[in-house]
Image (spheres, rainbow, N blue to C red):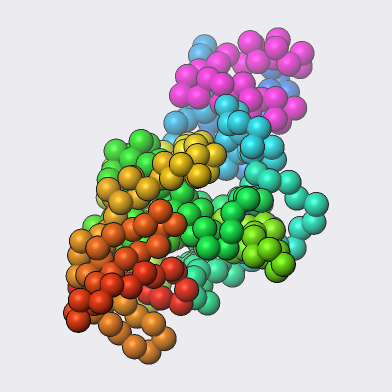
């Protein structure tokens, strides 16, 4: 019954639906509707009620709700699970068996969120989107960076569409707003050793949506989307937009449709950068991004190098 009531409320989000209409549609009493609404409010749903008008699911309602996300998405995303907390959605997916391409796991918080190069990803409750997708792409290991690029472009475009903000993509896996990191991507793959092709890939993304109290280590480095806009949207809307957009770039990955946008919104292209590899720092200029999403750089001695992600970090100078 809860799902049925939520379906009606979501179908009319930001508008009032009368208790009588809901009761008739669902063949239960108005008192029963009122009881369910009370329970939903306790679960965190933001539902207004008005005499003679009924109930209204507010536009800023921010409870993650899978059927609402899934509604209108293609069959690629055949199952979307939402959990209250996970250690890491990437790790959780890697421990699951018999998954099919397009499975999505979203957590409301992560206790051991993982970032690249062994770093952690701060994932406080109710503040962000912590989401992983299980994929089985027919790509070689060498081409796998293209998936990260597709996700970056999908997040960039979705933020643009939902909030009107023009974020930048910091090769290879960070989304930046005005020098603050607002999102990161961690793709983990299992390799078919004989053919050096991908067996499966877990595509994880962490997006800081609402303002949150930053731990000392993130001060001046991390930000959230809402640090840069007064527009408030529920996370379901952004998730849906990201999944939809990602699907397009993923399905057209062999035509590199992601590449022009990846370059256009690059944070480092044509800039002087520092490349940090283990303990050494090398200065270079970022000159291009190639069809495999590798970064081309020119060192001070004019030598050109092609970088795949590896253990490298990039800093803009
Ligand atoms: C980075 O910034 O280096 C990458 C961060 C990736 C974070 C996401 S949140 C969902 C998924 N689960 C994880 O543990 N990590 C990724």
In front of the other: 90 or 68: 90
Q: Is the residue 291 above or below the residue 188 in the image?
A: above
Please tell me how many numbered marks the rendered image carries: 0
Quadrant of the rendered image containing residue 18: top right
The reply to whether residue 263 is visible in this rendering is yes
Q: Can you give x and y, in whole percent of width and height, for residue 145 in the image?
A: 49, 59
The image quadrant where one finds the C terminus is: bottom left
Left or right of 303, for residue 76: right
Residue at point 70%, 30% (across, down): 3
Q: Is the residue 163 above or below the residue 116 in the image?
A: above
In front of the other: 204 or 274: 274
The image quadrant where one finds the N terminus is: top right
Q: Which residues are magenta?
A: 1-28
In front of the other: 297 or 8: 297
Quadrant of the rendered image containing residue 284: bottom left
Residue at point 76%, 58% (across, down): 96
Residue at point 50%, 39% (across, down): 252
Most distant residue in the right direction: 98
Q: Can you give x and y, in whole percent of width and height, for residue 79 in the image?
A: 69, 40
Q: Can you give x and y, in whole percent of width and height, for residue 151 in the image?
A: 47, 50
Taking the magenta stretch, the answer to whether it contains residue 5 is yes
Q: Can you give x and y, in whole percent of width and height, for residue 278 in the image?
A: 41, 86
Left or right of 198, for residue 180: left
Residue at point 46%, 77% (across, down): 311
Q: Is the residue 302 above or below the residue 169 in the image?
A: below
């Amino acid at each position: 019954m809860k799902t049925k009531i939520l379906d009606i409320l979501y179908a009319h989000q930001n508008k009032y639906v009368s208790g009588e209409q809901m009761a008739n549609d669902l063949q239960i009493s108005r008192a029963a509707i009122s009881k369910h609404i009370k329970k939903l409010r306790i679960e965190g749903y933001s539902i207004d009620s008005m005499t003679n008008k009924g109930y209204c699911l507010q536009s800023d309602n921010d409870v993650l709700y899978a059927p609402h996300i899934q509604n209108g998405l293609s069959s690629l995303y055949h199952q979307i699970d939402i959990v209250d907390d996970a250690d890491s959605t990437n790790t959780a997916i890697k421990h699951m068996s018999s998954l099919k391409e397009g499975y999505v796991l979203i957590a409301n918080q992560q206790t051991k969120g993982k970032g690249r190069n062994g770093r952690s990803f701060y994932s406080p409750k109710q503040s962000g989107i912590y989401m992983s997708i299980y994929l089985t792409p027919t790509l070689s290991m060498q081409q796998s960076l293209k998936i990260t690029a597709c996700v970056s472009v999908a997040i960039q475009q979705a933020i643009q569409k939902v909030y009107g903000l023009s974020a930048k993509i910091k090769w290879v896996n960070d989304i930046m707003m005005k020098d603050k990191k607002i999102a990161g991507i961690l793709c983990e793959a299992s390799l078919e050793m004989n053919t050096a092709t991908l067996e499966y890939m877990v595509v994880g993304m962490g997006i800081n949506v609402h303002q949150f109290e930053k731990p000392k280590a993130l001060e001046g480095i991390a930000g959230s989307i809402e640090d840069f806009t007064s527009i408030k949207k529920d996370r379901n809307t952004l998730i849906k937009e990201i999944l939809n957009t990602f699907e397009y770039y993923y399905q057209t990955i062999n035509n590199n449709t992601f590449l022009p946008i990846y370059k256009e919104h690059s944070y480092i292209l044509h800039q002087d950068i520092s490349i940090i590899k283990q303990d050494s720092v090398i200065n270079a200029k970022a000159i291009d991004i190639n069809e495999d999403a590798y970064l081309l750089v020119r060192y001070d001695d004019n030598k050109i190098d092609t970088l795949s992600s590896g253990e490298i970090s990039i800093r803009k100078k």
